Image (tube, helix red, strand yellow):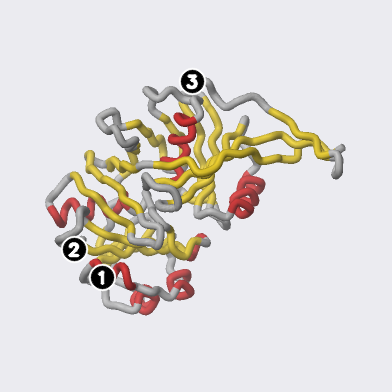
Amino acid sequence: MKGIPKKGFLIDNIKGLKYTLIPVYFVDAFTSAAFCGNPAAVCLLLEQADEQWMQKMAAEINLSETAFVTETEGGFVLRWFTPISEVNLCGHATLAAAFVLWHTGRLGKDKPAVFHTRSGVLTVFQDSDEAEGWIKMDFPAEAPIPAQAPEALIQGLGLIPRYTGRNRMDYIVEVDCEQTVRELQPDFLLLRSLDTRGVIITAKASPECGYDFVSRAFFPAIGVDEDPVTGSSHCALAPYWSKRLRKPVLTGYQASSRGGFIRTELAGERVLLSGQAVMMMEGQLGKSVVEG
């Protein structure tokens, strides 16, 4: 393991400030094509940063998630921030973080990325059986429990759900068909009033499609009205659809304007989520450390 590189500095002679340079990468996750999937920023830190600074940086970057990675004994500490809050679990930014570590040579391609997170230890592997760069993540299964749909959910979606459940993070709502999922225009103000992170809407895929189920994910309460492709939602969708379709291995398509595919496989109390990634930008952030 090469680790995160040593500290570099930049002097701003106009403002008289000294900056430490932080490597940052923009990655499109859950896609094999640029400008699709879900974009995430990955910041590689030399040491644990101040929480308020990380939140401000996530707001400045203004993607659905910014991942902050710090090397530690036995792996890496990984934290995820939306533009307005820290979250407990994020799939696409985890995939992006592992992809960056391998892409930059900071972690050998034959080594798993082991992340210590708010949701426990998450392990990410490169799929050795795939020639197309698929990455497999070992995540907790978050199966939904049937729940009564509150009025704000019904009115916010503008429909009567076929099924409503929830887990520790979200409402999971099944509707009648894929067309309903794709054409839905939710009321984000009403959805923001719910006591969950967000709402996942889903349906069985149309017969002619090459995937098993379709979904969309709405998180207005954490500053993301619609997330392009959401790994953590598939921690609920995988056990739900595996039971409904009687298949342990599935492919889901998240039908946002960017769109992306996630393969899922149940493994006891865990779910394996697989996707691809594309490096979009590489650069450096300047964090002020000494005033001149």
| SS label for mark 2 | loop
Determine the residue located farthest toward the top in the rendered image. 1
User: How many residues crowd around disc 1 within 10 Å: few (fewer than 14), some, or many (20 or more)?
Assistant: few
Can residue 89 be seen here? The reply is no
Residue 179 is marked as 1
Q: In this image, 186 relative to 238: left or right?
A: right
- Which image quarter: residue 128? top left
Report the residue marked by disc 2.
206
Nearer-N-terminus badge (2/1): 1
- Which image quarter: residue 71? top right
Q: Residue at x 27, y 72 (%)?
A: 180
Report the residue marked by disc 3.
1
For marks 3 and 2, give the CA distance. Answer: 45 Å
Q: Residue at x 47, y 69 (%)?
A: 192
Look at the image and tell me in which quarter the C terminus lies.
top right
Do the CB atoms of the residues marked 2 and 1 lie less than 8 Å apart? yes
Of 77 and 269, the residue lying toward us: 77
Do the CB atoms of the residues marked 3 and 1 lie less than 8 Å apart? no
Tell me the kind of residue under disc 1: Gln
| SS label for mark 3 | loop
Q: Position of residue 132 (x, y in %)?
A: 31, 36
Nearer-N-terminus badge (3/2): 3
For marks 3 and 1, give the CA distance. Answer: 47 Å
Q: Residue at x 46, y 72 (%)?
A: 188
Tell me the kind of residue under disc 3: Met
Nearer-N-terminus badge (3/1): 3
| SS label for mark 1 | helix
Do the CB atoms of the residues marked 3 and 2 lie less than 8 Å apart? no
Tell me the kind of residue under disc 2: Ser
